[in-house]
Every structure is written in structure tokens, then in C-alpha cells.
Image (tube, helix red, strand yellow):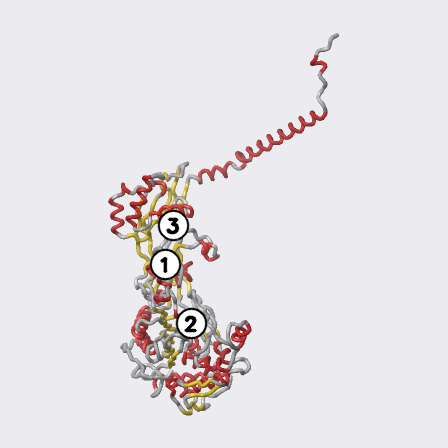
Amino acid sequence: MIQLYEERRPPITPELALRVAIFGGVALTLFAIIFFRLWFLQVLSGDKYLAQAMGNQLREIRVQSPRGYVVDRNGTILVDNRVGIGVQVDPQKLPPDGPQRAILFHKLASVLKIPVGRIGREIKRQRKLLPYSNVTLKTDATRAIYTYLFERRDQFPGVTARPLFVRHYPHRDLAAHLFGTVGEISPPQLKLARFRGVPQGTIVGQGGIENVYDRYLRGRDGATRVQVDALGQPKGELQVVAPHQGQQLKLSIDLDLQKAGQQALKDAGGGLPGAFVALDPRNGEVLALGSTPTFDPNLFSKPVSTRLFKQLNSKANGAPLYNRAIAGLYPTGSTYKVITATAALQSRIITPSTVIDDPGSVKIGNITFKNAGGAAHGSVALRQALQVSSDVYFYKMGAQLNGVHGEPLQTWSRRLGIGRQTGIDLPGEFKGLLPTPAWRDRLFRKHQTDRPWSTGDNVNLAVGQGDLQATPLQMAVAYSAVANGGRVVTPHVGLDVEDAVGRALQRIDPGASRKVHISDANRQAILDGLHLAASAPGGTSADVFKGFPRKVFGKTGTAQRAGQGDQSWYVCYVPDGRRPVVVAVTIERGGFGAQAAAPAARLILSQWFGIKKKFVTGQSRTR
């Protein structure tokens, strides 16, 4: 029989059968995976994805909240808000890319007085940060711009003008360094823990108390919930959540005293740079604090040009943004003698009755140190040395304190707040420089100075000269400690967080004060000397305070600065059962302490105690 070809074909090989089995198993596995995945998505997770799909139809547009008000200790408004006109663009309603959009941007740039390229950049930037929100091109447009755009709405498709809250400083440059500024939150700030959860585009404090107390002042933004179609086009508003204004902040500042202080700097300093601090020595409440030249913080309520920002930081213009009250580092001149006296008395180098001869000069090492003007005061004890500001007396104190175990001059300086931050609730405070033997010797080893520490360095420090760098606030704290019996207060500006009607919600804790021991006898001797300096014949500020109805304890200072005229200083304390005050004033290139700083202090004190203001210039030629 003839066998057919198909019947003669060999059976499937084992290798082929294995491959078919493997292929079939893989196909079955893949089918099972797809089947179970579809079952998981549609059966187990169906509700979840349905909710997400519904969520894609909703968008939330943030509504800016107004910042809280700032008031002084008497409830007078210092900082508030005003309603400005914001010019915004809705990108969804703009003409498509091309000639029409280019024409619109050119017309809009001409109206707003901004570069045309900035419009496109701002749209891209803000849309990336805040999708579905309108893009703000100008935050404080004029009424004329608003009217122009309103009357030509058909020529500016997608362009709207709506009210926005703008931070307002009604007293303009008054206390500008204290209040600080506001601005849009920056990318580095978004990474800080204190701004966790704050969205892009939020206006936050950038300086001063606006920054320190931002979490209270910022408020809570509202939102408008908008329904959109599949292309993201808005279809209508569904819900509006109203914004909540920030809380009110009450400061320790007295508005009238602040005005008087800044005017006193202007009158006594003649436009020269300077600073002042008025402090309650009992608790550290800052009653007034100012620096000149100053600036108008309203400028920062809208974007500031690079050119203007450079001008405000320019040394040629006096660096108006520089807060000299807490960051101005200066030698203090003879105002430092109070600290030197405390160190010498407490370390028992002298007693209040120790008499030292002042022939007008003293030779220490190979250097001769002289009194200002070469005056010779004869035999003086501590009280008289402070009264006439005998440099020779304190030169000898500096020499005797040098090399003493424990470095009493540096130790007491630091205890009273020199060379360390005071802890005030304002950003940007400098700790200054308290020169010590270890500091200068370290620089010498590193070849950063020409010599190691010497007795002359301690002599200079004793009269507030040499490498010393201190701030007006530090000197006010040091004098407060002597005045109040040895309590080194923490100066503070914030008092209370309040609701919109002024009810206290939270008392601000300034932090604990430090206690240093100054014997009553030593403290009284220093205060006696300061009172003589402001009242007795020959006192360095007696001419300035002649006829002043309050008891003043004050010390002039005239600090020499390389390449500049003498710096004028005055620090004083006036006791009162209800309203005691310490005032520190310094004026760059102001000359002798009695010529500029002391008259400014008198004007400040006159305001605080309700005394008729009288500008008096001292005639003393001592430092």
C-alpha cells in the first residue's frame, strides 16, 4: 500500500512541545494579570477613581487675606491696609499666541508702564506657581489706569482690574526700621519650617516686626471653588470661602515719643546719620527706636526696582535701610566709663572714695594718653571723675584692670550686654565686638594684625575706644542694668496679640532677664556721678539740662573714628514711679557728646514727661 505524505510526517518534537507550553503559560499569566488588574481598578478602586475624576472638574482659586493691624501701646494704629487696584490677566481668555496677543501685550505694557517682555514672563512664572489663578501684573494701579481699562474692556480681552489689599504705613518713614517691610514669599523662605504650608505668591513679612510676628499678622487666605470642563475652562463658581484677616499686634512703642525721637535726631544731628533708643529699664519695653536716614516702607508694598533697592542700600545715600539702633557698630567714647567703673568697683580695684590724681595726661608704656583739650582735673574720686569725664582717671583704671585674673573689664562688659546680642524681637541685630586679649592674640598668630594684646588696648577699652564696637541698644541695656539694680533686661517691641476689636488674645513673652550683682554702695556712687555730670557745675551735660525739671543721670561720649569726625553719644536714665526711661542717642560726625547727642536726648525726655521742648546745645569741651 502506498502511504500518503501527511501520514509519513514525523510527530512534534519534545523541544517544540516545551516551547509551546512555556508560551502558553506566559500568555495565560499575562491574561490573568490584566484580568485581575481590571477587576481591581473597576471593582475594588472604582469609588476612589470616580472621586478623583469628579475632583478634576474643580479648581480652587486663592483669595488674599488682609494682614492684621499694628497698634502702639495706646491703641493708635501704626500699620494697616488699604484697598489698591490690581491689574490681572486671565490666561484662559487671552487671544491665542500670535499677532493678536502680541498687539494686546504691547498696548497693556504702554498703559501699565512696564516692559512688554515682562508680561509674558510673569504669565509663565505665576501660572507655573499658581495654576488656574489670574496673573497679577500690577498690584497698585492708579485710578486713571482702572478707568482707562474699564472703558476699553473690548480692547483688552482677558484683562481685569480688581481690588487687592495693600500694606499701608500711614506715618510713612516713621519707625520704618522697626516695622520692616512685606513682599511675596521667596523660594528660600518656602523651605523654612516657619512657612510650612504657606503657598507660593503669599505676601509675608520681609523685615522688622512684619517678619518676626508674621504668623500672627498674615491671616488665612480664602478660596473660590470653580468648576472647569475637560479642557480646564472655567464653567462657574461653586463655593466661596471668605478670607480671615490676620490678628492685631500691639507694640510697646509710644507713637508720640517715636515722632519726637526722630525729630530730635533731625534737629540735633542736622541730617547726619544716627540712632536712638528709649527703653523702660524695669522690663525692657522699647518705648521708641529709630535710625536715620530712614525710608518709606510703603515703597515695598509693591515690587521694588533693582535701581531703587540699590539706592536704599547705598552708603553714598547713608544706607537708609541700615538700622543703626541695633546694627550700628561704634566705639562709644566716655559713655563706656559707667561699665569701666562697675568693673573696677566690683573687682575691688578701687572704692568710690579712692582718689586719683589727674594732671591732664598719663604715660602708660611708651604712649602718653591725654584728656580732651588737655584739661587737668586734679585729685578726683569716682563721682567727680564721672562728673567731669576725667579720661586720665579711667585710663589708669584700664591699666590697673589689665592682666587681673578673670579679666574684670571684659567680664563685666559682657555681663552688662556688650559683645552679645540683646535678644530684641527684631531681625538683623549685631552682637558687636568686645576686644579681649585672647581675641587679639589669635589675630596676631594668624598674621591678621600687627601686634598682640597690650596694656594700651585695655586703656582704650576703658574709655570706649580702640577696637570696641557696640550698638545704641546695647548701651541702653547696660545703663538699664545699673539703673534697676543689676537686672539685664531683654528688650522687646511686641506686647500683645489682639483680636480685631483690641481684646488681648496672647501676651508675648520677651524672655527672661539676667541678674548680675552690683553692690548698692557701688551702684549709688555711679548714679551720683552721672547725676553730677548732668546737673553740677563742670558736669559734661550740665549746660544741656540746666533748668530741666527732672533728675537726670547721664553721660556724654565723644568717640574717635578713623577717617571720620568725632561721634556724639549720650546715654541717660531718668527715674519715675510710673514712667522711668533710659535713652541712648548717637550721631555720626556729630562732634562732642554735649553738642548733638545730649540735646537730642533732652528733646526725647521732654516729650516723654510732657515738658515744654527746648533745644539746648552744651558748651562743654570734654569727652
Percent x, y for residue 76?
32, 65
Local secondary structure at mark 3: strand
Q: CA distance from mark 1 to mark 2?
A: 33 Å
How packed mark 2 is, by other alpha carbons closer than 10 Å (few <14, some 14-19, many 20 or more), is some
Residue hosting label 2: 329
Q: Amino acid at mark 2?
A: Leu
Q: Position of residue 97 (x, y in %)?
A: 36, 39
The front one of 152 and 169 is 152
Q: Tell me where residue 1 sits by quadrant.
A: top right
Q: Are marks 3 and 2 in contact (CB under 8 Å)?
A: no
Measuring from the top left, give residue 617's x and y in whole percent: 30, 80
Q: Earlier in the sequence, mark 3 or mark 2?
A: 3
The mark found on residue 193 in the picture is: none
* Label 2 SS: loop
Instruction: Residue under label 1, please give it.
Output: 68
Q: Residue at x 45, y 90 (%)?
A: 356
> Which one is earlier in the sequence, the residue at label 1 or at label 3?
1
Looking at the picture, which amino acid does disc 3 mark?
A: Gly
| Distance in Å between CA atoms under marks 3 and 2 | 44 Å
Q: Is residue 313 above or below residue 587?
A: above
The residue carrying mark 3 is 222
Q: Is residue 581 visible?
A: no
Q: Compared with residue 171, is residue 585 higher up or lower down, i.e. above or below? A: below
Q: Amino acid at mark 1?
A: Gly
| Labels 1 and 2 touching (C-beta < 8 A) | no
- Residue at 51% from the left image edge and 81% from the top image edge: 454
Under circle 1, the secondary element is loop
User: On the picture, is 200 further left or further right than 30?
Assistant: left
